[in-house]
Amino acid sequence: MTDSAAGDPGENGEGGSRPVVHDLDPACTRTDVDVGARYRAVVNGVVDYGVFVDVSEHVSGLVHESNLDGESFEVGDELVVRLEELKDNGDVSFDLADVDLSEADVLAVEHEPEITLAGDVAVGDDVTVEGEVVQIKQTGGPTILHVADESGVLAAAAFEEAGVRAYPEVEIGDVVRVSGSVERHDGATQLEVGDVTRLEGETAEAARERLDEALAERSEPDPVDPLVEWEAFEKLRPELEDLARTLRRTVLEGRPIRIRHHADGDGMCASIPLQLALENFIEEVHEGDDAARHNLKRLPSKAPFYEMEDVTRDLNFALEGRARHGQKLPFLLMLDNGSTEEDVPAYKNLAHYDVPIAVVDHHHPDPEAVNDLLDHHVNPYIHDEDYRITTGMMCVELARLIDPDVTDELRHVPAVAGLSDRSKAEVMDEYLALASDAGYDRGHIEDIGEALDYAAHWLRYSEGKTLVGDVLDVGCDDSERHRELVEFLAESAEEDVEEQLDAVEPHVEHERLDSEAHLYRIDLENFAKRFTYPAPGKTTGELHDRKVRATGEPVITIGYGPDFAVLRSDGVRLDIPQMVTELNEEVVGGGVSGGGHLVVGSIKFVEGRREDVIDALVEKMADAELDEELSTTVDLDD
């Protein structure tokens, strides 16, 4: 019992001259009363053998007629009683107290329920949970409140009448106490609500402080050693740990997560491990077999940046989710894209709704353009490193920080990411050795990369969760199926590539630049097969690799269409992002945009200025410096 009369329950008040009478909050239960204490009571029934009284909505009992001294009472009469006995069978007995309320110190007693953590509730128990309302869903029957505390998120069903909002005063973000009985519903634990109390004032503030401290502690990423020791990578680790902390906190607070990633091998190697780790953590925190499906969505991006079509679809989906299911707007996680000025319009669109955004990317960034719009931006260029640290490599470590139990499934993934993106990382041999120890030789790793690229093309930017997981062998439950699938897709990709290269080869234009680099050009619009695999970017890359093998010298390749060009270089330091900036200034009305790395990228432009843009681009390429460190000839011949 929490009041100023703690101690001897029958003691007097001020100076010992006035008796103490306790006035219980309606929510008080047996845990809030003491034998021997006096209570303000109201008669709720009169029988031959005494009167029944209420001292709160949950504590009632009998004053036996032998204790009434001949006095008579009616329903509704107010009196003072002394608690005589709390019986094991639940009965409560009172004695009539000879006290006049006008001559007593009346002390209000607040109900302090025993709080049960959401993660500790058991079916059949009557419990009270305390936490933040993170979702309110109105069904055709009850109102479903999702309440989050430091242990998890629990659904609580409150019924007013069919389809009518129960407890309309409660809103998302409120701290509440919810009491009721725990039941099983549709395979998930659910609290059948008896009462909901919205906490206010100091009580709410104290609860928020407790929740914040507990959530901060549980949000801490698990300490894991890196898969390989790499000094360059260690510069990024504090930022990855900070992002892991934010993502775990996001799950604990009941906010959905939406992943957008580049639709290529490295993008898949980044997103699939994170999806697995986050789904595991979501299932640990949320009740229900479909919790991960409702709280995490992953989709490839249609372009190497977050274009307005994608953000409009994502925002519309999120707003519909909020309207239909009472969800918070999601946390957006951009992988293997999202670092450039081209992403700014989409980010500004999300800013109207205060959607938090994090980016993990290894493309050349425009931090001055995007950083003010981002909550996290992890990119090796910001730390004077470069594209050698692929997004897949970063996200494998990020996934392990979120859930270390995924480690054994991911040991081969950095090698797949590195080979898929032609990384020149000095630790590639270590990543390949790690993969080999896990049962994946280099040939198989290369085939996985080709199969991922092939699958991504035909998925047409759909998630393809099971298919992609089976190809990458992450979350796959059949190793034989994985190997057969990879073999089939990789062989199909190789056949389609050869057919495409045979079609374009006779039309490739070649010239030798003053720097002695070879320049190859191909008009993809007129001489490549369209709407099939490989797409223009892949076609240009495969043609480029063929020429590198054939010459063993510095090579630049341009594949162009009516309003785009794909660029690849080997042994030549192009600095494609800088070229794009200069072209946009020099070719007036050209509408040049795009970017990439030092050796690979793409640009877009106005169709009518294609010739001017390509000519200006070739001039810049002719002036570019040769750089043997950027040569991949040895890797391609292995």
Image (cartoon, grey):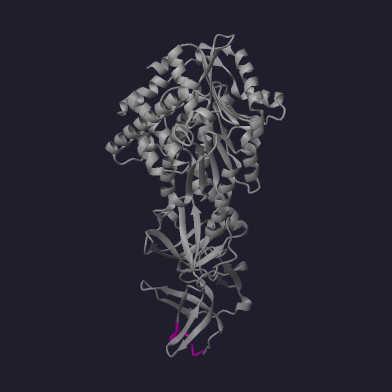
Is 315 or 210 nearer to us in this picture? 315
> From the viewer's perspective, is 48 left or right of 199?
left
Count how many numbered circles sit on residues in the image. 0
* Vertical order, 225 against 218 (above or below): above
Q: Specify the quadrant that holds the C terminus.
A: top left
> Residue most toward the left?
480
The reply to whether the magenta stretch includes residue 360 is: no
Check the image and report above or below for 559 versus 263: above
Residue at 47%, 54% in the rendered image: 153
* Residue 411 seen from this side: no
Q: Is residue 503 or residue 58 the one in the foreground?
A: 503
Residue 154 coordinates in the image, percent (x, y): 46, 57
Q: Is residue 70 magenta?
A: yes
> Which region is colored magenta?
63-71
Residue 125, percent across and down? 39, 63
Q: At x 53% / y 57%, what residue is drawn?
A: 135
62 versus 230 height, above or below: below
Q: Is residue 445 visible?
A: yes
Q: Quadrant of residue 359?
A: top right
Kindly give the residue lying farthest to the right in the view shown: 588
Viewer-nearest residue: 102 or 73: 73
- Which is more toward the observer, 523 or 551? 523
Name the side, left or right, on which 84 lies relative to 509. left
Q: Residue at x 64, y 16 (%)?
A: 619
Q: Position of residue 164 (x, y in %)?
A: 54, 70
Q: Residue 15's x, y, as percent?
A: 62, 67
